[in-house]
Amino acid sequence: MSLQPSKSEKRITIMLFSLIVVFLIAIASTVIIYLQATQPMRQAKKEATALAQKYGKVDTVDAFYRLSKAGTTYTVVGKNPENQTVAVFIPKDGTNIKVMEMQSGIDQNQATQLVQQAHNDQTIVKANLGLLDDQPVWEVITKKDKVLNYYYLAFSDGKIVKEQQNI
């Protein structure tokens, strides 16, 4: 009586081993692709946070936004040493950095509520804080029937300053 595996058992073992190797390669490839795809945003967040700490004296970061309408703006929202929540608006080139107290304008929840009230047949997708024509705005993105709509609300009072529909 032989204890050696049969040819069919060897084939099954080789196929299972091959499937496991292919599966591990697929997982590793997916992770590498994801890390490479998100690297520019992670780097931008790191650099924007450093500038927010320098110019806005931000100790803790509560939110990070990217708005790319007429040029890219990164916005870091966080608390300063006086425990005030501030927004630091950083154009992509790192010049003309603006620091504003969040209490001087509307917050993300208020911006999305204003858009939802005006367009209750649309679903809110996302909101970003940034600069449009050098003015702080909330960009609220909505969706209806697979169509995107962009509403830009003035940070100061929530009035719609620009909108793009059916994109």
Image (cartoon, rainbow, N blue to C red):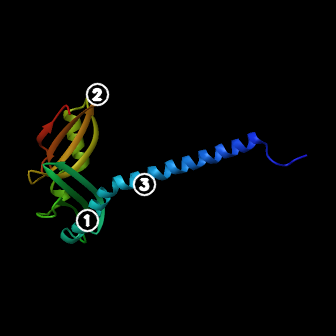
Task: Label 3, secondary structure: give it.
Answer: helix
Q: Quadrant of the C terminus?
A: top left
Foreground of the two, 16 or 68: 16
Label 2, label 1: how far apart the Cα atoms are: 37 Å
Task: Label 1, secondary structure: give it.
Answer: helix
Q: Amino acid at mark 2?
A: Asp
Q: Nearer the viewer, mark 3 or mark 2?
A: 3
Q: Is residue 163 left or right of residue 17?
A: left
Q: Is residue 105 above or below residue 47?
A: above
Q: Which residue is mark 2?
A: 145
Residue 112 falls in image quadrant = top left
| Mark closest to the chain's N terminus, 3 or 2 | 3
| Furthest residue toward front | 7
Q: Residue at x 82, y 48 (%)?
A: 4
Q: Which residue is mark 3?
A: 32
Q: Is residue 120 above or below residue 151?
A: above
> Could you tell me residue 95's position as x and y percent?
12, 64
Task: Label 2, secondary structure: give it.
Answer: loop
Label 3, label 1: how far apart the Cα atoms are: 22 Å
